[in-house]
């Protein structure tokens, strides 16, 4: 679809001359068969035809030519412009007047219709563009839509949309043809200038009939004023709203080196304005999303703080109460009682230590600066150390069944002791008082699987993934101990080892935490 | 009102096993009879079953919070409730007092602090303080009936309002008294929100009774809540 408004070209004038000449050639052999006045009507027919085809000016040319040709060939004496009969002069002049009048009239109608069609197409194009924006395209898609439209309107040899990246330097997000993407330094400098100054470069003057500086016609300067050295014919149009400069539309020179035509540029500006508003909206959306993300981070931080304060303060409060109790002078403590009090302090100190380690682990894991120390280990060794970390009265509740031929695994021994100890403590706590905890392991072709299971109430399906989230504490949690970080850390440790950890159901009831580790560890451990 | 031969019975409600253990140990060693509950619901049941002389209640518990337990208890329970709150959680403290708690101890607390509060609350609940014609606070002697305050053989001149405030604080010595309670008692219920006036009067009172009014020793401010008269 061409969106150029109709203006007669050389072709139209040639057609005008050609038609008049051809008609004359046809009419000439018949010169004797008709009265000389009747030819006028036939030539008028030609003039009207030309007007309808090419507009006013070709019609005028045709009328003038017809006037001359009629005189020359059909008014005696033939072959001269002289006129014998003065009445023929009258006919000639009347013909000229009528020809011109009809040519002008018909030509105008043709031009008006052409303008109406063009306007209709422009409106359709604007509508299409805005309805494409309604579907919320991505920024590169908008760039493509705008560039396509710009190409269609102007017929430019190249188009591109340049948008500043994070460093602030403008970069093409879409370009046609693709090789345009590699802009030379001057073009990029001009684009940056147009964006920085909020001024267009190389824009023609506003179309005729508009008074002064139209509202949506940006202030434009020449390429030279913007610092260009060569003779350029391209356009730089800033995409801007009152609050923001989003980018620059680059429109290359039109074919055959002709300049950009004002009324096409006017349509282009309308599209640019729509695109600017859209990009502004995109920007605000992104800002809103970022705010949302910050809020989320803030929430996580406050969850973290409350977990920290609870997990650190509770054992501290307990220690303080117990120690001050021992120090109060009003009671004579016997040795056994005092030992009992001190044992409580020790268990609180263990708890504090565990919480602090977990909190430090989280920050370490979050900084992603942690690499495990790998060594060949027996699962049984890891398990026995993990069990020794449990309170003595709880150890008896753990039973284990490890196959004797279980292959060694190459892992970080201390980290896996902590993971297993955490899983065991969890199983003992959440399984409920008196529940049994079982540990098992097996080798499958590529992996070694280790599991810890309890016969407690189990974990609801919707919680099986959430328990691995930071600070998530299961609904069935009875005690208030734990930072809610242990499983998140366990998952991270598994991941760093190239393994996995997940929860399964135990029939008839209970939860089973499965760990799967690669049997022959990747020579390279998964990077965090 | 417990009979003299029976030790006061105290119910401890805290979800944290270690804190529960410490509280039980502190109280039991002082010959209080201690019952412990691990959550709000259990606490309510034990309160109904044993009708304790005092309840020590943790405000922040998962499930039924201490505030809810307090509200529930106050529908029928008259004896003192001492809540445990975390430092900085002023809102929790105030909410607990609004729900009918009598005093609070901030975690971490020392055994001595907890015992002092427990004793003060039990004393007040026994009605001894309110009925006493003369209350001794440190080196001050407050004669409630004669409306006189003496330090040694020196008479301290107080206005009527100042005396009323001091007497009310003394009758509730060692326990927190909210500004609203003082205002309601001294000025009347319609003045319960006029904390500015109260602050002015307390400031005058401090100038008259405190050895160092800017660093009060007797009338201690409980930020955001009210005042506490320290007896020792």
Image (cartoon, rainbow, N blue to C red):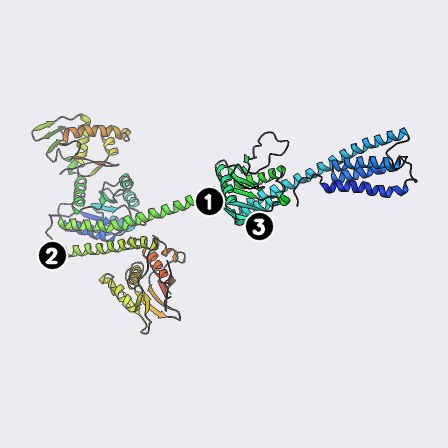
For marks 1 and 2, give the CA distance.
76 Å
| Chain assignment, label 2 | A
> Which residue is located at x 39 percent, y 58 percent?
A464
Find residue B150 and report its horizontal and vertical position in percent. 10, 30
Find residue A305 and report its horizontal and vertical position in percent. 31, 47
Q: Which residue is mark 2?
A: A335
Find residue B230 and report its horizontal and vertical position in percent. 16, 37
Residue at the extreme left:
B153
Residue at the extreme right:
A32
Q: Quadrant of residue B122?
A: top left
- Determine whether label 2 and label 3 are within 8 Å by CB: no
Q: Quadrant of residue A206?
A: top right
Crowding at dot 1, Cα within 10 Å, few <14 / some 14-19 / many 20+, comes out as: few
Looking at the image, residue A4 sits to the left or right of residue A313; the answer is right
Mark 2 or 3, closer to the camera: 3
| Chain assignment, label 1 | A
Position of the C terminus of chain B by quadrant: top left
Position of the N terminus of chain B by quadrant: top left
In front of the other: B144 or A253: A253
Which structural element holds mark 1?
loop
For marks 3 and 1, give the CA distance.
22 Å
Tell me the number on the disc at residue A169: 1
Which of the two labelled residues, at mark 2 and mark 3, occupies the earlier sequence position? 3
Q: Which residue is mark 3?
A: A177
Q: Is residue B40 visible?
A: no
- B212 shown above or below A378: above
């Amino acid at each position: 679809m061409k969106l150029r408004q109709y203006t007669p070209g050389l072709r139209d004038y040639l057609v005008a001359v050609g038609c008049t000449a051809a008609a004359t050639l046809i009419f000439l052999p018949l010169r004797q068969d008709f009265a000389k006045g009747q030819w006028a009507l036939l030539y008028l027919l030609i003039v009207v035809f030309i007007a309808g085809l090419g507009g006013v000016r070709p019609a005028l040319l045709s009328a003038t030519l017809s006037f001359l040709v009629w005189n020359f060939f059909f008014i005696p004496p033939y072959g001269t412009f002289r006129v014998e009969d003065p009445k023929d002069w009258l006919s000639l002049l009347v013909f000229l007047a009528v020809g011109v009048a009809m040519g002008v009239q018909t030509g105008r109608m043709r031009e008006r219709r052409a303008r109406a069609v063009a306007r209709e197409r422009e409106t359709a194009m604007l509508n299409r563009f805005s309805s494409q924006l309604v579907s919320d395209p991505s920024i590169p898609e908008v760039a493509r839509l705008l560039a396509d439209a710009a190409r269609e309107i102007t017929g430019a040899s190249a188009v591109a949309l340049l948008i500043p990246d994070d460093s602030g330097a403008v970069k093409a997000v879409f370009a046609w043809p693709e090789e345009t993407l590699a802009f030379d330094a001057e073009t990029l400098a001009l684009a940056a200038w147009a964006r920085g100054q909020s001024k267009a470069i190389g824009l023609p003057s506003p179309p005729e009939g508009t008074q002064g500086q139209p509202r949506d016609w940006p202030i434009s300067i020449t390429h030279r004023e913007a610092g260009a050295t060569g003779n350029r014919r391209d356009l730089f149009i800033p995409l801007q709203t009152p609050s923001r400069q989003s980018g620059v539309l680059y429109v290359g020179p039109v074919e055959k080196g002709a300049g950009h035509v004002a009324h096409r540029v006017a349509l282009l500006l309308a599209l640019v304005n729509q695109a600017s508003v859209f990009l502004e909206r995109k920007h605000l959306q992104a800002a809103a999303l970022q705010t949302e993300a910050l809020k989320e981070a803030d929430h996580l931080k406050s969850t973290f703080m409350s977990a920290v304060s609870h997990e650190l303060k509770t054992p501290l409060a307990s220690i303080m109460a117990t120690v001050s109790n021992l120090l109060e002078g009003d009671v004579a403590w016997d040795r056994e009682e005092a030992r009992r009090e001190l044992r409580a302090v020790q268990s609180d100190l263990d708890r504090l230590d565990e919480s602090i380690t977990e909190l430090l682990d989280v920050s370490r894991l979050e900084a992603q600066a942690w690499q495990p120390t790998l060594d060949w280990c027996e699962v049984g060794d890891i398990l026995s150390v993990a069990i020794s970390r449990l309170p003595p009265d709880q150890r008896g509740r753990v039973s284990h069944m490890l196959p004797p031929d279980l292959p060694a695994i190459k892992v970080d021994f201390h980290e896996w002791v902590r993971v297993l100890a955490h899983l065991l403590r969890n199983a003992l706590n959440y399984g409920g008082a008196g529940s049994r905890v079982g540990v098992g392991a097996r080798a499958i072709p590529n992996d070694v699987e280790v599991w810890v299971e309890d016969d407690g109430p189990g974990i609801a399906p919707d919680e099986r993934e959430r328990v691995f989230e930071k600070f998530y504490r299961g609904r069935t949690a009875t005690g208030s101990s734990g930072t809610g970080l242990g499983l998140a850390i366990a998952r991270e440790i598994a991941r760093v080892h190239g393994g996995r950890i997940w929860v399964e159901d135990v029939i008839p009831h209970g939860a089973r935490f499965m760990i799967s580790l690669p049997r022959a560890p990747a020579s390279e451990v998964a990077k965090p | 009102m417990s009979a003299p031969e029976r030790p006061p019975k105290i119910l401890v409600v805290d979800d944290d096993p270690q804190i529960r253990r410490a509280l039980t140990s502190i109280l039991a060693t002082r010959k209080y009879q201690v019952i412990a509950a691990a959550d709000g619901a259990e606490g309510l049941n034990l309160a109904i079953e044993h009708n304790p002389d005092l309840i020590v209640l943790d405000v922040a518990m998962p499930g039924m919070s201490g505030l809810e337990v307090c509200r529930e208890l106050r529908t029928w329970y008259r004896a003192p409730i001492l809540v445990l709150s975390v430092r900085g959680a002023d809102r929790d403290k105030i909410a607990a007092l609004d729900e009918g708690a009598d005093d609070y101890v901030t975690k971490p607390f020392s055994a001595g602090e907890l015992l002092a509060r427990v004793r003060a609350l039990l004393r007040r609940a026994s009605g001894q303080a309110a009925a006493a014609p003369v209350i001794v606070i440190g080196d001050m002697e407050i004669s409630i009936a004669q409306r006189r305050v003496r330090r040694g053989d020196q008479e301290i001149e107080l206005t009527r309002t100042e005396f009323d405030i001091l007497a009310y604080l003394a009758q509730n010595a060692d326990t927190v008294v909210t500004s609203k309670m003082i205002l309601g008692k001294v000025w009347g219920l319609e003045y319960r929100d006029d904390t500015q006036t109260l602050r002015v009067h307390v400031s005058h009172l401090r100038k008259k009774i405190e050895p160092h009014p800017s660093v009060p020793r007797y009338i201690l401010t409980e930020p955001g809540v009210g005042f506490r008269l320290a007896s020792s």
